[in-house]
Image (cartoon, grey):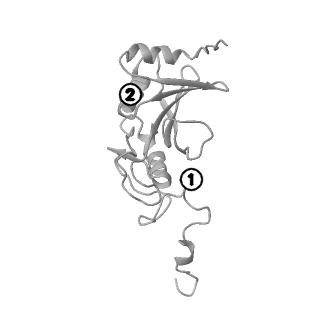
Amino acid sequence: MSQTHVTLDHPMFKVVKEAFPSKRFRATEFRGQSTLIVAPADLHEVLKFLRDDERCKYNFLSDVAGVDYLNYPTRTLGRFAVVYNLQSFSRDDRFFVKVFLDPTLPTDGILNDPGLYVDSVCDLWPGAEWPEREVFDMFGIRFRNHPDLRRILLWEDYPAHPLRKDYPVRGRGEREAYEVVDRTSA
């Protein structure tokens, strides 16, 4: 039985591979969306290249998102991923860059896991500050060199990261501990 070879046709795959011949990349295309998968150590350098190189010119970071692949039906390169949604206005082109991370500690708490670190891109796109904070808050992924990495949606001593798939849907009793504030006590 012969295997079919799929050709990925987004021009940035070739440009990035030529610019970084010694680095290993993976690439996917799904429904017209192209994604370059990079190693965490190479992320900042590759994103800077995609922003600055004249052939790329991805001048807008549209979003930074976190993904938890716990119990995903197919094998992935890590449990968590951070996805960067880049856009080039001059070509009206969108390109995704993804980095996979694997926790080295149990994920049922708020531990500072050394496996869940990636470099911040706030120095490349200042608009990354709040999306990176949201990924940190919800997934516990930390961004090195972030100018103000703290929770953005939950209070500072919240005991977990609620978008992790091993976090209970109904919470761990946090709501029951709320102090009810009404008009007479405020």
Residue 17, quarter of the rendered image:
top left
Q: Is residue 114 visible?
A: yes
Give the numbered dot on residue 155.
none
Of all residues, the one furthest to the left in this rendering is 145
**Considering the numbered disc 2 on the image, is that residue within a helix, a strand or a loop?**
helix
Of all residues, the one furthest to the bottom in this rendering is 184
Q: Would you place residue 50 above or below residue 176 in this image?
A: above
Residue at which label 2 appears: 48
Residue drawn at x 61%, y 13% as measured from the top left: 5
Residue drawn at x 56%, y 19% as measured from the top left: 91
Label 2 crowd bin: few (<14), some (14–19), many (20+), radius 10 Å: some
Give the numbered dot on residue 165.
1
**In this image, 66 relative to 106: left or right?**
right
Of all residues, the one furthest to the front in this rendering is 1
**Horizontal and vertical percent position of residue 114:** 34, 48
**Horizontal and vertical percent position of residue 80:** 49, 43
Q: Would you place residue 156 above or below residue 90 in this image?
A: below
Taking depth in this image into account, of 111 and 180 the one nearest to the observer is: 111
Label 1 crowd bin: few (<14), some (14–19), many (20+), radius 10 Å: some
The amino acid type of the residue labelled 2 equals Lys
Taking depth in this image into account, of 57 and 64 the one nearest to the observer is: 64
The amino acid type of the residue labelled 1 equals Lys
**Gap between marks 2 and 1 measured at Cα:** 31 Å
**Considering the numbered disc 1 on the image, is that residue within a helix, a strand or a loop?**
loop
Q: Would you place residue 65 above or below residue 54 in this image?
A: below
**In this image, 104 relative to 78: left or right?**
left
- Total numbered circles: 2
**Horizontal and vertical percent position of residue 109:** 44, 61
**Horizontal and vertical percent position of residue 30:** 64, 27
